[in-house]
Image: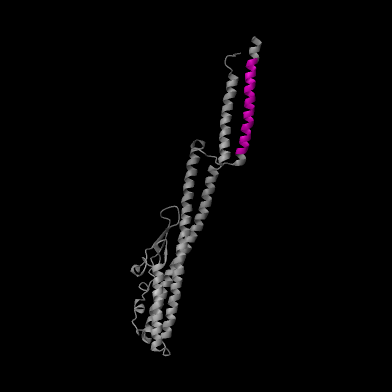
């Protein structure tokens, strides 16, 4: 028997150190809730989990973009709804003007009413915006009465995941109402009232087309958001399986390592005791 080097004790100490490291790693997992806390825990698993996390973050932003797009489209639709009410009123007034029971003075009053209504229609077009983006024409006020730019929404994680709403020009110029809005005093005769009814009908058709497109775009965006929400749930679940710790399993492992640690301490004490007993025999 060799007593200069206590091999049994050294072996037990090495095992105890390894067990201590395992306990430390187990405690880290239990305290953070993650199975993977550093690359050395699971290099390939960390790479996959990080990629899934990036994907989930991108999808979440796509959902946020979609919700913002819905808000924008609702603003545009509500504004055009008010413009539609205005055109309905204008049509009714033109019908009123195109009858023999309405006097010339009455038609002049109707002309003034129509002028104010169409001015308000233009005001709506020149004021409706979302965070500075004008929705019914190109810019604020009468100077910006050209068509708005097409609205492109990225509703997804990739740059190609876009939904587009066509350009809108929902003002008197875009709706073909400049002649009606520019009538001079006493310019609204019964004949003009009859002719302009056709013009207003065409404007209503154009406006309804804009609103229909807005509604279709909103439905498309809402569908995309619902799909993204399902994707986000699945991607986060996949990341959780890889990254997150199984508390039941890890708690059992922690208890097991504690028992092994206690047994290791006992083994070290016994290995040291054997050497001491041999030394006593030599005294």
- Residue 164, position in %: x, y? 41, 61
Q: Residue furthest bottom?
A: 100
Residue at (42%, 69%) from the top-left corner?
A: 210
Side of 13 where 74 appears, left or right: left
Q: How is the image coloured?
A: one colour
Q: Judge whether 77 appears above or below 178 on screen.
A: above
Residue 12: x and y, percent? Answer: 60, 23
Residue 49 screen position, x and y as percent: 50, 44
Above/below status of 34 relative to 140 = above
Task: From the image, give the main secondary structure of the stretch colored magenta.
Answer: helix
- Residue at far top of view: 283
* Residue at 47% from the left image edge and 49% from the top image edge: 55
Task: Magenta stretch: give its range.
Answer: 250-276
User: Which residue lies at the image location 39% right of the left edge and 75% below the top edge?
Assistant: 119
Q: Give 156 or 71, whichever is nearer the viewer.
A: 71
Residue 75's quadrant in the figure? bottom left
Q: Is residue 254 magenta?
A: yes
- For the C terminus, the image quarter is top right
> Horizontally, is 280 left or right of 43 in the view?
right
Up/down of 49 relative to 95, above or below: above
Horizontal side of 98 relative to 6 (left or right) equals left
Residue 143 percent across, percent down from the top left: 33, 68
Is-magenta flag for residue 123? no
Query: Which corner quadrant holds the N terminus?
Result: top right
Picture mark count: 0
């Amino acid at each position: 028997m060799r007593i200069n080097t206590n091999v049994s004790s050294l072996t037990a100490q090495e095992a105890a150190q390894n067990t201590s490291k395992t306990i430390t790693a187990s405690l880290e997992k239990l305290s953070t809730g993650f199975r993977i806390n550093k690359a050395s825990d699971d290099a390939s698993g960390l790479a996959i989990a990080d990629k899934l996390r990036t994907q989930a973050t991108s999808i979440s932003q796509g959902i946020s973009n979609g919700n913002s797009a819905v808000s924008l489209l609702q603003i545009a639709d509500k504004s055009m709804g008010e413009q539609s009410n205005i055109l309905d009123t204008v049509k009714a007034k033109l019908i009123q003007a195109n009858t023999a029971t309405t006097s010339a003075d009455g038609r002049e009053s109707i002309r003034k009413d129509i002028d104010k209504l169409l001015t308000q229609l233009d005001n709506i077009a020149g004021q409706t915006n979302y965070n500075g983006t004008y929705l019914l024409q190109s810019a604020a006020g009468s100077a910006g009465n050209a068509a708005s730019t097409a609205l492109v929404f990225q509703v997804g994680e990739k740059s190609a995941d876009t939904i587009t709403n066509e350009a809108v020009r929902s003002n008197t110029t875009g709706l073909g109402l400049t002649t009606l809005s520019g009538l001079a005093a006493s310019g609204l005769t019964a004949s003009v009232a009859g002719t302009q009814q056709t013009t207003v009908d065409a404007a209503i058709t154009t406006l309804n087309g804009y609103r229909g497109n807005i509604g279709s775009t909103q439905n498309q965006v809402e569908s995309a958001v619902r799909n993204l929400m399902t994707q986000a749930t699945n991607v986060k679940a996949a990341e959780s399986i890889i990254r997150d710790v199984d508390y039941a399993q890890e708690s059992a492992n922690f208890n097991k390592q504690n028992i092994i640690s206690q047994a290791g301490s006992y083994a070290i004490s016994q290995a040291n005791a054997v050497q001491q007993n041999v030394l006593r025999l030599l005294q």
